[in-house]
Image (tube, helix red, strand yellow):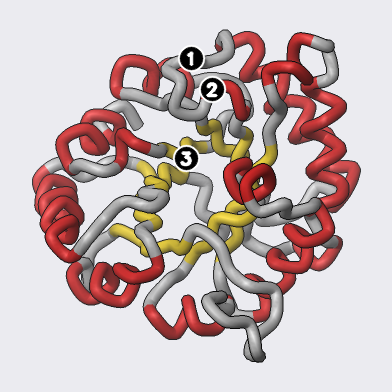
Amino acid sequence: MADTRHLIAGNWKMHGLAASLDEARSLMAWLDEHPVGARIALCPPATLISRMAEALAGSTIDIGSQDCRAEAFGAFTGDISAEMLADAGARLVILGHSERRAGHGETDAMVAAKVEAALRAGLEPIVCVGESLEQRRAGDAIAVVTGQIRASLPSMLRGQVFSVAYEPVWAIGSGLTPSIADIEAMHRAIRATLNARLGMTDPRPAILYGGSVKADNAAQILAAQEVGGALVGGASLTAESFAAILASA
């Protein structure tokens, strides 16, 4: 049976050393005392995946990665395949984040290939889409995001468990967020595009919101129409700040 709970995933980005595992352990202890009605995931840097999986063994927290290589193995110095991530203990993987698209030149086609790799390795993809401030001001936000969905999501996702994370690029780390009406309008457009691209599939993919999600706006965002969870950045780095968001779920 499909899991219809919200998914709240913490993206640690390039933060975290061995000592940071104490934050993950503290979050696990908090969840033991304060169960929440949402799926929880932490996506640390690759260097911590296996150690975090070991530290959180038996907990309700899933472990994810922040990227993967499309190929399974090969002469790709410094890259990590989806198979390697699964072997290290990851269950999910973030793909197509705006920081990868902008900073590493990732195209929609590259993201789609990585999605196929994630499915090949048994990982659950979280596929990121989002518009820049210039694109939003030009009135192109919905066209840009729905175009990314059509080109970044391969047809083999039909019937698979995955999520789409809508992250307006201009809101990430800025403290700015779109209005709830704007979030709902975008999420409705994403849902319509998913239905057109893949059909009314079961399980129904969740559409997460990301971009300056904090304790003081999480409850309102999570209650918005078609919002199926959140992708949280800096606020997921400490157990205290992430727990404050989870308490809203």
Between disc 1 and disc 3, the foreground one is: 1
Q: Position of residue 229 (x, y in %)?
A: 49, 37
Image-based side of 141 in relation to 214, left or right: right
- Residue visible at 21% across and 67% down in the picture: 56
Q: Amino acid under label 2? A: Ala
87 is higher (above) or lower (below) than 18: below
Image-based side of 227 in relation to 14, left or right: right
How far apart are labels 3 and 2 at the CA level?
12 Å
| Comes first in the chain, label 1 or label 2 | 2
How far apart are labels 1 and 2 at the CA level?
5 Å
How far apart are labels 1 and 3 at the CA level?
15 Å
| Comes first in the chain, label 3 or label 2 | 2
| Comes first in the chain, label 1 or label 3 | 1
- Residue visible at 50% across and 29% down in the picture: 172
Between disc 3 and disc 2, the foreground one is: 2
Query: Which residue is identified by label 1?
Result: 176
174 is higher (above) or lower (below) than 56: above
- Residue visible at 41% across and 37% down in the picture: 232
Q: Can residue 121 be seen in this view?
A: yes
Q: Position of residue 31 (x, y in %)?
A: 18, 48
Q: Amino acid under label 3? A: Leu
134 is higher (above) or lower (below) than 50: above
Choose between 110 and 163: the one closer to the eye. Answer: 110
Figure quadrant of the N terminus: bottom right
Query: Which residue is identified by label 3?
Result: 231
CA neighbours of label 1 inside 10 A, class few (<14), some (14 to 19), many (20+): few
